Amino acid sequence: MADNDYAETAVKRFQPRLPASLYEVAWQYSLYDWYSAVQSGDIDWELAPEHLAYLTPGAKSELFGADDSLITVYADLSDPENPQLRPDSDGGPVEIGTYTRGDRFRVGHAYPANKTSSMTDYSITTHKGADAHHIAGFRDDAWGTNNVQDRFTAWAQSEYAETVREQASEADASLLDGLATLGDDDEQMQALGEAFVELAGGEDEEFDSLITVKVKDPEADEYRYPGEIPVLNDVMVEKKSARLESISVEDASGDGVGYVTGNNEQVTGGSPGLFGMYGKKQREHFPDIDTKGSDAWRTRPLSFDTAAAVAAADSIFEDFFRGLGNNRRLYVLPYLAMRRDELDTDTFEWFYDTIYTALRDAETGPDGTFDTELETLVREVTDGAAADGETDFDDLVDEDHWDRVRFAIVLQVTGNPDRVYFDTLDGIFQPAALEDAHNDVTRSAIFEGDGIFGTYPSPESSPYLGLGLPLVRRILYGDYFGRTTEPTRTSRQASETPSVGEIDDHEMRRVRALLTEGKIPLQPLLEEYIHQLVQDQNESFDSDSDYTAFPQRSVVEQYTQLRALSDADMLESTNTTFTFTTSAMTDEPDSRTDRLESFLDNHDALDADHTRAVFLLGGLVGRITAFQSRENVSSTLVRRYPIDYLTKQTVKEVTKEVLQMDHSYAEAEEDRSYWTNNRYTSRLTDAMLSADPNEWTMSDAELQWLYSLGISYGLNDTRVAQADDHADAAAADD
């Protein structure tokens, strides 16, 4: 079959609707995997797609190239009336060799997902790690399964083989009969076991191997592996289909409409689902905890072919995840958002070559190529969507291939049990939009020239303050929020690491909200901002550094993040007393007074008297601290009044003492070397007196974060025109 014919076969097996769940994505991946297999050159016989969907060619990839990793028994069925094991003159009944990547389809291995010790493989090829005595079939207890003899007994004589034999052609039925007849021949089975022990070098030799059977039938001159023999694959499919009715429930099948196919057919609900969502390692099998199967096939009805593809998808997905530490895996699964009648072979091949293969073959890990490849693909897709004006599933009918690509995102935390914490079918447009908004913020006037953050912190000091930053993967991986937040006030000093996947996973909780809800609540974000700042400041108190004991860079990173979230309409502020929308500051400030006035006017969060008062108080603390640092005063105001000291109960006290200190410094500095701060003090007094702070409705997190922002502003409030100093001095004289 030509390559284009394989692509045409895959296209014909696409679903007739747009993907609406991860099940459809898994079905697509089974087609890409089949196409990859037939393209690889490792399949030079006609392997039906429906058979490949049930196989697990990568399940034991760790055995590729390992010594003694493939045990092959030879069954000569060329004479149907007299089945024999291969005679010693031709090499004997069994060989011990090396399992290679090129063998992975030929052996026809079907391995249970999340296999436990009591489960058995569906195919005649099986896996076993045991001593030679066990593998020879000489262990006589219930645990002695998966050996060279029971391939002819337990497997070839099973009810599944019988079901297939009844429906098979005469030639295929005779092949199954021949295997079963060998199983009944005690003399030949004993000889097989003894031959293996002798070849192994003794009963105590240990093996970790696949055990398979090569067959010579009347029509063949050579022995063939089971994957090359359709009737043996049929038995494997029958056994696996039966298991799909009872993996985590009983009798989970019935007549219904396939969840993926939309066809009226026999469906099963016994699939373990993707990532083991409904398998034995999960806490809940079904919403009603009904394991009898009466409703299982109604809950998630899958055709048996679809269920098999879903079961095998986990092994395919293993090439598409990025480990995030602490047992967390983020799966990034690109797929085509196309219906079958919209898809042609050129588009299928383009997606397979350009996207599927590129990401599958990328090396994972911090030093791998996965991150770079993902960024490249995401940018191509989002640029294509932007050019077409589309950011969702609407109007998917043009000819732009990139615009037909979507990325499913899944966060799984492995353990006991494995858990999926969130999944989405369209998981890159929000991060891409947030990246664009973030880069717009760092290009704004406030970060340039005489902008308040134009000089410090420097872009080189932070991965989030530069220009044109590639942030999509940082957002997806959680670092974007992990860098700016801490789950608790003392989490860095906690005696043990917060449990993975729980509420204190402050990184991925916000990724989930962004991808699945499109909004991030402001109030809890501010709370964790403060946790971060308090811990940063406490660490600076304990440091011998000459730098000011204030986490200015962290505040500016948080400020940038808030503005980006707000500009991208991804910030939910219903539970806060202020919003964080901003207006563009277009004019170059003529003075520091103009700059402050512009900052206040262009931030909605500073419109109210109480929020403006807190910010101005922070600004004055920052200004005085900068002066104290210049004068080598050790007990600076940021040390006397750290971030978490300020509350509604202490704000009046702090304001009074800060104003007094400002006045004292102004009087003491006869040469006016003290930077007078009339632009703060004149506004602060009126704003602070407009209402009793005890009546403010703002939370401590809101108050302390605005105070921190003010301090950062005050520490940076230098440069522009020097006229400010003279104006402040004149005001002081008045």
Image (cartoon, rainbow, N blue to C red):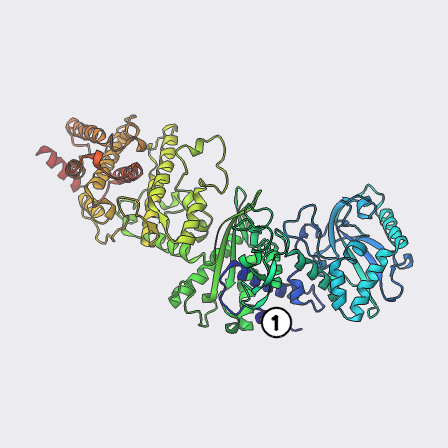
Indicate left or right for 435 with 178 as reference.
Answer: left
Q: How crowded is the residue under tag 1: few (<14 C-alpha within 10 Å), some, or many (20+)?
A: some
Q: Quadrant of the N terminus?
A: bottom right
All told, the count of numbered labels is 1
Task: From the viewer's side, name the closer residue of 147 and 409.
Answer: 147
Say whether residue 484 is left or right of residue 69.
left
Residue depicted at x 40% and y 35%: 488
Horizontal and vertical percent for residue 145?
77, 48
**What is the three-letter code of the residue carrying label 1?**
Thr
The residue at 24%/30% (across/down) is 649
Residue for badge 1:
9
Q: Give residue 554's quadrant in the image.
A: top left
- Kindly give the residue lying farthest to the left in the view shown: 734
Residue 310 percent location from the top left of the image? 59, 58
* Depth check, front residue: 686 or 393: 393
Name above or below for residue 625 compared with residue 262. Answer: above
Give the SS element for disc 1: helix
Q: Nearer the viewer, residue 296 or 74?
A: 296
Is residue 470 visible in the rendered image? The answer is: no
User: Of residues 622 and 319, which is closer to you in this image?
Assistant: 319
Does residue 496 lie above or below 195 as drawn? above
List x then y, in percent, for residue 698.
Answer: 26, 39
The percent coordinates of residue 700 (x first, y second) are 29, 36
Q: Is residue 321 visible?
A: yes
Q: Quadrant of the C terminus?
A: top left
Q: Quadrant of residue 117?
A: top right
